[in-house]
Amino acid sequence: MRWIHLVREQWDRTIAWVAAVAGAVALLLGYLGISRTPYTPEQIPYLVSGGAFGLFMLGLAAVLWITADLRDEWRKLDDLDAHLEELIELAHDEAAAREREAEARNAATGTSRARPPAASRRGAQRSAPSSRRPS
């Protein structure tokens, strides 16, 4: 049961292993077929079938393995993103709770915290436009 779960969970790596083994077997059979005959015209079918199929399967195995690794990395990044969003939400909740506590404390003591005008909060006050024309 454990192997079945592992194969289902890591299906791309399982197919990559099967493709790699099939590619290696095809290359080996192609080599054995080529080595049995000294005539070049008789070697070409083994080269085409065994060599081309073997290299294709090994390439497929490499691509599947790389995509499995990339999927794992994306899964890790998604987990990090979810944790970061939780931390941001907690920080916002904590800031809102502190602000409510300060407002409750000010209401209980009868003091209020005066907020500066909007322009001074931005750092620089803008002057009113002049009615004079430039000369």
Image (cartoon, rainbow, N blue to C red):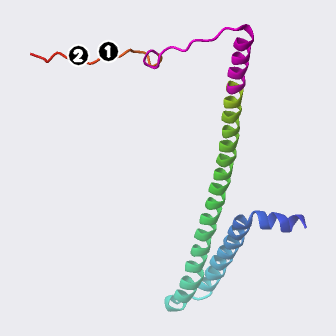
Quarter of the image for the N terminus: give it. Answer: bottom right
Quarter of the image for the C terminus: give it. Answer: top left
- The residue carrying mark 2 is 130
Coordinates of residue 2 in the picture (x, y in percent): 89, 64
Q: How many marks?
A: 2
Q: Is residue 95 above or below residue 84?
A: above
Q: Is residue 63 above or below residue 88?
A: below
Q: Residue at x 73, y 17 (%)?
A: 104
Coordinates of residue 33 in the picture (x, y in percent): 62, 85
The front one of 90 and 67 is 90
**Mark 1–mark 2 contact, CB under 8 Å?**
yes
- Name the secondary structure under disc 1: loop
**Type of residue at label 2?**
Ser
Residue range in magenta is 96-120
Coordinates of residue 60 in the picture (x, y in percent): 60, 70
Q: Residue at x 71, y 21 (%)?
A: 98
Coordinates of residue 51 in the picture (x, y in percent): 57, 78
- The residue carrying mark 1 is 127
**Type of residue at label 1?**
Ser
In this rendering, would 95 be left or right of 118? right
Q: Residue furthest front?
A: 110
- Name the secondary structure under disc 2: loop
Q: Residue at x 66, y 30 (%)?
A: 92
Q: Residue furthest left?
A: 135
Q: Main secondary structure of the magenta part?
A: helix
